Amino acid sequence: MTWTPTGWATVRQANLDPDQRSAPSFDTLVRHTYRVLATRAMRGVVLYAEDPAINHLLEDLGVPVLEG
């Protein structure tokens, strides 16, 4: 997934899972996967993004930066 000025966008070609890439409802499947991973942690979760646009979005949302 990537962040664009109009919102989240999924990129089928960037996904390495062949089952997900061939799914007819790819966009919904990827969004559901990320939602589950980000909300089901028992003690916490670390969100890592290489995309500068996503990092900027996370900062704007007040997500603390993990130092280390």
Image (cartoon, helix red, strand yellow):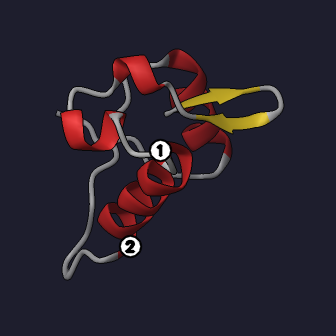
Q: Which residue is mark 1?
A: 26
**Sequence order check, earlier mark of 1 and 2:** 1
Which numbered tag is attached to residue 58?
none
Left or right relative to 40: residue 23: right
Asked if residue 40 is positioned above or below residue 45 in the image, the reply reads below
Q: CA distance from mark 1 to mark 2?
A: 20 Å
Percent position of residue 25, x then y: 51, 51
SS class of the residue under badge 1? helix
**What residue do we see at 46% from left, 19% from top?**
51
- Viewer-proximal residue among 67 and 28: 28
Left or right relative to 4: residue 62: left
Percent position of residue 20, x then y: 31, 43
Asked if residue 15 is positioned above or below residue 61 in the image, the reply reads above
- The quarter of the displayed image where residue 38 is located: bottom left
Instruction: Kindly identify the amino acid type of the residue bearing the numbered disc 2.
Output: Thr
**Is residue 48 at least partly visible in the picture?**
no
- Viewer-proximal residue among 48 and 6: 6
SS class of the residue under badge 2? helix
Q: Which residue is mark 2?
A: 39
Residue at the limit of the structure toward the bottom, as seen here = 42
**What residue do we see at 34% from left, 46% from top?**
47
- Viewer-proximal residue among 67 and 55: 55
**Is residue 31 at least partly visible in the picture?**
yes
Left or right relative to 21: residue 61: right
Instruction: Kindly identify the amino acid type of the residue bearing the numbered disc 1.
Output: Phe
**What residue do we see at 44% from left, 55% from top?**
29
Q: Residues within 10 Å of mark 1 (few under 14, many from 20)?
A: some
Q: Residues within 10 Å of mark 2 (few under 14, many from 20)?
A: few
- Front disc: 1 or 2: 1
Q: Quadrant of the C terminus?
A: top left
